[in-house]
Amino acid sequence: MVVHALRTRWDGTPPYEPSTFAGIAVEPLVDVLVDVAATEPLVTALPVIDAALHDRRVLPEMLAEAAETVSTAHDKAATALRMGSALSDSPAESVCRVRFMQLGAPVPVQQHVFARSGERTAVVDFWFPDQGVVVEVDGRAKYGEGLEAAAAHWQEKQREDFLRSFPEVRTVVRVVWSDLMAPERLRAKLLRAGVPCR
C-alpha cells in the first residue's frame, strides 16, 4: 500500500515523478518515503528518510510539506518525516537518534565541529553541550583490518585526545550497533556519562 502525499508546488520535480530503477517502474520518491514513514517502525523509517536527505534526493521542505498533507497514519508519518536529517552520515546514526528520542535524552547537536586555529579539526556525530558529552557511533568497517586497523585505532586515539582537550568536553561515549539494538545498554552508557534519560 502506498500512502500518497497530496500534490504541492513541487509537482513535476523528480521526487514527485515516477521513475525507473533497474528497469522497473517505481513510485515517486516522496510517496515512497511517506509510505515508509506511515507503515514502518521509526527505527526502520528514519534511516531511509535520512539517506534521501543526505544524498540530496529530496529537500527538507518537501518532507515538511508531505508531513502536513499525508492523511493516513498522519501522526506516525509526520513524526518520521519531521525527524529526517541530512546530517546523519549512516543508518547507525539515524537509529541512534531514534533511540535518543525513545530514551527521553535531550536532542543533541549533530556533526558538531571542534576546532582550534592552526590545529586539527574534529567533527563528532553527536554533542550534548549541556552535559559536555560527545557521542560517537562506531562501526567495524571504519577501522579496516591488520596494519590498517592499527593505524586507524591510533588516529582515533589521537582524535579523542584532541576532543578531550576542550574544557567543555567532559567525556566521549562510544556506541556500537549492539548498543543500538539493546536500548537499555545505551541508556546505561548515557546515564553513566551524565546524559539524562527517562
Image (tube, rainbow, N blue to C red):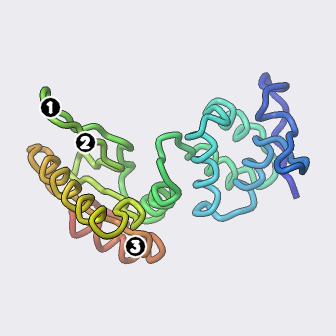
Q: Earlier in the sequence, mark 1 or mark 2?
A: 1
Residue 174 percent location from the top left of the image:
29, 64
Quadrant the C terminus occupies:
bottom left
Residue 187 percent location from the top left of the image:
35, 70
Q: Report the front residue among 5 and 15.
A: 15
Left or right: residue 49 compared with residue 157: right
Q: Earlier in the sequence, mark 3 or mark 1?
A: 1
Q: Secondary structure at mark 1?
A: loop
Q: Is residue 1 above or below residue 129?
A: below
Q: Earlier in the sequence, mark 3 or mark 2?
A: 2
Residue picked out by circle 2: 122
CA–CA distance in space, label 3 to label 2 = 23 Å
Q: Residues within 10 Å of mark 3 (few under 14, many from 20)?
A: some
Residue 178 percent location from the top left of the image:
43, 75
Q: Amino acid at mark 3?
A: Asp
Q: Amino acid at mark 1?
A: Arg
Residue picked out by circle 1: 116
Residue at 65% of width from left, 64% of height from top? 41
Left or right: residue 114 compared with residue 69: left
Quadrant the N terminus occupies:
bottom right
Furthest residue in direction front, as rendered: 147
Q: Which mark is residue 179?
A: 3
Q: Report the front residue among 74 and 91.
A: 91
